[in-house]
Each structure stands twice: as C-alpha cells, then as structure tokens.
Amino acid sequence: MDPMDIVGKIKEDASLPKATMTKIIKEMLPPDVRVARDAQDLLIECCVEFINLVSSESNEVCNREEKRTIAPEHVLKALQVLGFGEYIEEVHAAYEQHKLETLQDGVRSGKWGTGAEMTEEEAAAEQQRMFAEARARMNGGVPQAKQPDTDPTLESS
C-alpha cells in the first residue's frame, strides 16, 4: 500500500496507541509467551491495515446504498464482502455488548438519566447550583450573590 493511500494522509499519521495494543496482544497470549518488539510493531501495522480495509469497504457499501453516514450495518456487510463472514456473529455480539455498557455507563454517570431519581426540589436546587457555577465561570471565577426574584412592578419606592 502506498503511504498516501490512507485518505490523503501519510501512513505514519494513522496509528494505534502502542501501549494499548501491546496490552491487548499480551492479554491474548499465554503468560509464558513473549513477543518480540518487531512482532508487536507488525501486529499493530496489521491492525491499522485491517481497519483501513474494513473502513474503505464500509464506505463503499454506504455509497452503494446512497447514504452519507457509515452505520454498523455497513461495517457488518463490509466484513461479509471481504470474506470475514465467519466473524460477523461475534462482531455483532461485541457491538451489542458495547452499546449496553455505554448505555449503563451513561445512566450511572447521570448523563441519560430521566431525572426520576431526584425529587423536584432536589432538581431545582441542583439547577440553581449549576446556574451559580456558570455565573461564577462567566464572571472570571468570582461568585456573585443570587439576585432575589422580585417583580419590579410590585416594588414601591
């Protein structure tokens, strides 16, 4: 593959985190097996090439369907087209597991919570706290006292 084949970028620009890849490689092997640094580098390059191959074919599938966004279904179809059909069931299961874990992480962190865990008073108090933090950030970190909620038309001079 020519170094410029990766969507207009130099090949060295497209890489995977070496420490993460080394950890994955070691986790897949028995503890008594050692992997030479050159072999680790080669495995990482193979992973990058595989990602490029599947991405490119996924894009082709997406284009054939006249879509503008590559969806998981396009990736699964690309695996089939490229001759990796035997992995589709496992890839799909991993994808479903990832979606489930992502959803659970989001609910745990409160990102996608319904708010049902909080009373209306607690939600109002949290909202006021967040407003105060935002005001402080807007004022250069200097917290300002909350102005009382009064209607100026009701005030007497």
Image: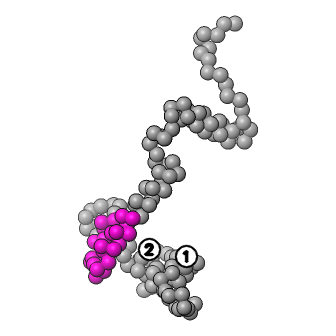
Mark earlier in primary sequence (1, 2): 2
State the residue in front, 42 or 110: 110
Q: Give residue 89's position: percent from left, percent from top.
A: 30, 73
Are discs 1 and 2 less than 8 Å apart at CB?
no
Label 1, on which residue?
20
Q: Give residue 11's position: percent from left, percent from top.
A: 50, 80
Q: Secondary structure at mark 1?
A: helix
Name the residue rendered at 44%, 60% in the picture: 101
Task: Give the amino acid at mark 2.
Answer: Val
Q: Report which quarter residue 136 is drawn in.
A: top right
Residue 157 on the magenta span: no
Label 2, on which residue?
7
Task: Give the amino acid at mark 1.
Answer: Thr
Cα separation between marks 1 and 2: 24 Å
Q: Nearer the viewer, mark 1 or mark 2?
A: 1
Q: Give residue 1's position: percent from left, percent from top.
A: 42, 86
Q: Vertical placement of 53 versus 94: above or below?
A: below
The stretch in magenta equals 72-97
Q: Is most of the magenta stretch helix, strand or loop?
A: helix
Q: Vertical placement of 28 versus 59: above or below?
A: below
